[in-house]
Image (tube, rainbow, N blue to C red):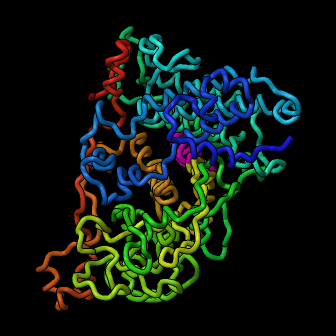
Amino acid sequence: MKKIHYYIAIIILLSSASCKKYLDIVPKEVVTEEDIWANIKNAESALARLYMAMPNEMSDELWGASDESWHHWENAQQPSWKYNFGSWGPTDNPFGNWEGRYQDIRKANLFIENIEAVPLLGDQQEYYGSRITRFKAEARFLRAFFYFDLLKRYGAVPLVITSFKEINDPSLTHVHRNSVDEIVRFIVDECDEIKSILKTQFNDEPSQTGRITTGAAIALKGKVLLFAASPLFNGNSLYYGINNKDSKKLFSQGYDNEKWNLAANAAKELLDLADQGIYSLYSPNRLNPVDNYAQLFYSREWKETILARTLGSDDIFEQGHLPNGYPFNGFGKMSVFQELVDAYETKSGYPIDDPRSGYQETGFWSGKMWDGAEESIVVNVSNMYKDRDPRFYATIFFQYSNWVFSRNLRPVKLAYFGSRGNKANDSDGWPWNSGTHNMTGYGLRKWNSPEVDLLNKQGVGRRNVPVIRLAEIYLNYAEALNEYLPAPNSEVYKAVNAVRERVNMPALPIAGRAQDLTKEGMRNRIRNERRVELSFEGHRFWDVRRWMIAADHNGLKGVDNRILHGMNNRPSQAELESSGFNPNSEEAGVAVFYKRTPMQTRIFNNKHYLFPIPNSEMEKNPNLVQNYGW
């Protein structure tokens, strides 16, 4: 029989996304669950709908709720604002999704319970007969992923692995929370049981590429074990008193170093597939380390990407994130913080606060720099941005950087420019409508495709959004092994260096840098490597929580409980006049631009590490107990 292309099924589902009836994924005249399980095509569509429920963390709001950036269109009603200023809780939690996730879990349970009984008619047996078992395994993976999504948010949650007749079945209002260790064990066991049922690759069925694989199951197992080993869930005394009403402990209190070993072994299991050639880091342009990294985020590739959400071919992302001014014609709606800029080492491999790094904050430089399409000339670029980690140039727009210069014919301008001249000279960062455009002097370049020309309405972006990719697994392995051992060994360095090598960054340990030889020093290196390699992929929001560094700790300011900075692109009139230039000129704005300037004061308390159980759920279910601090 004719095979159904996987992505066509997804598109069909998207077109019906507004339908309100549960599992209403078939034509209007077919709406009952019985109809779903009476027709294999309808059942396959139900599975595709589960795929669409996978978390999508390519989110301006999530990025803007981390210390990576400021979603400067935010107001008091938007999610990032609420998280940044602590104005969220049990009745208003934009990223909570408790009810939605349990609906997804119910759909997965129904699929798992019913798919093997769906009748196969005529020649359907030939195609579907060998696939039913795999479809069931895919649904089990997705159910496990949904539980991981809940684990990140709430820690201990009720584990419901059979369907209820109705979503409002009274039995659902009397479930208890399972412990974190029980949730972790369930996910790990599911991944271990299904990994041999899933396919390793789809080379023989290219149209099915993008489905869940053996590697995805192994990688999810490793991610869950990494969370379980991290300080949030491994000996966290904050949660000592969070017990069920029958006194069952929901959060284990004793630190268990063996949890790091389990996480390392799971990551290594995936890396063994890479050693077999199943996966490899995407390297399309080895001669250019900036482009070698950047292309991953506007390409559809499946060697590094283990699991992805595939976006449509369009220019929607570019409309939102390319610089605001003519001729780029984007909205430039993300302002990157100086703290992220400062996280990028110099190309020497030293952090910028190391005197050996060669970093300078004074003076200017002109020369050639990659602009997304070719090397082009930049002029009067601050030495702050000279000779940095290539990933910096692939990720961040900065003052006088270029973007496809042959087409746009001017650099990006993010400093103050008071008198707007002709369109070609406008600033990208300081329009008359204060607060609607770039606020920090840095914009988001990562994910933007140079094939898109918004001015002439040409080109589209074609990208996967990696849910899990190989570089993350290398860093998961390095972190877990470093934490397990008393000091880093060659395997720790090898894993980190595999990621650094793609962008020609020097291998660790750096000669003469004693910190790189210690457990604590490598912990800082690995965490920083995650920050720059995985920036704007949704990891930072969760990493600072599992590491418990978001709130004040051990005498240090929490990374989400402090003043965050940018460049001075909102100068005072006095500053502009003191520059010696016409205060309404570009020259005046640039002269006072290059200094770290407070932008936002973020609020994060210990209770914010885990989300509160929604009040609506607490009222329905007397057996639920609330998380710490709520």
Please report the residue visible at 28 percent of the width from the left and 45 percent of the height from the top: 82
Q: Position of residue 604 (x, y in %)?
A: 27, 43
Q: Position of residue 626 (x, y in %)?
A: 33, 22
Position of residue 118 relative to residue 452, above or below, is above
Position of residue 101 relative to residue 385, above or below, is above
Screen quadrant of the C terminus: top left
Please report the residue visible at 68 percent of the width from the left and 58 percent of the height from the top: 301
Position of residue 391 relative to residue 242, above or below, is below
Screen quadrant of the N terminus: top right
Q: Position of residue 539 (x, y in %)?
A: 47, 49
Among all residues in the image, which is located at the extreme left? 574
Among all residues in the image, which is located at the extreme bottom? 581
Q: Is residue 246 magenta?
A: no
Q: Main secondary structure of the magenta part?
A: helix
* Residue 15 is at least partly visible in this image: yes
Foreground residue among 74 and 65: 74
Among all residues in the image, which is located at the extreme front? 29
Q: Kindly indicate the quadrant of the structure image that contains residue 585.
A: bottom left
Q: Position of residue 7 (x, y in %)?
A: 68, 49
What residue span does the magenta drawing correspond to?
476-492
Q: Kindly indicate the quadrant of the structure image that contains residue 105.
A: top right
Horizontal side of residue 316 vs 126, given as left or right: left
Horizontal side of residue 371 vs 111, given as left or right: left
Please report the residue visible at 77 percent of the width from the left and 53 percent of the height from the top: 277
Horizontal side of residue 138 vs 503, given as left or right: right
Foreground residue among 494 and 40: 40
Q: Is residue 479 magenta?
A: yes
* Residue 558 is at least partly visible in this image: no
Position of residue 431 relative to residue 107, above or below, is below
Please report the residue visible at 70 percent of the width from the left and 30 percent of the height from the top: 137
Foreground residue among 263 and 27: 27
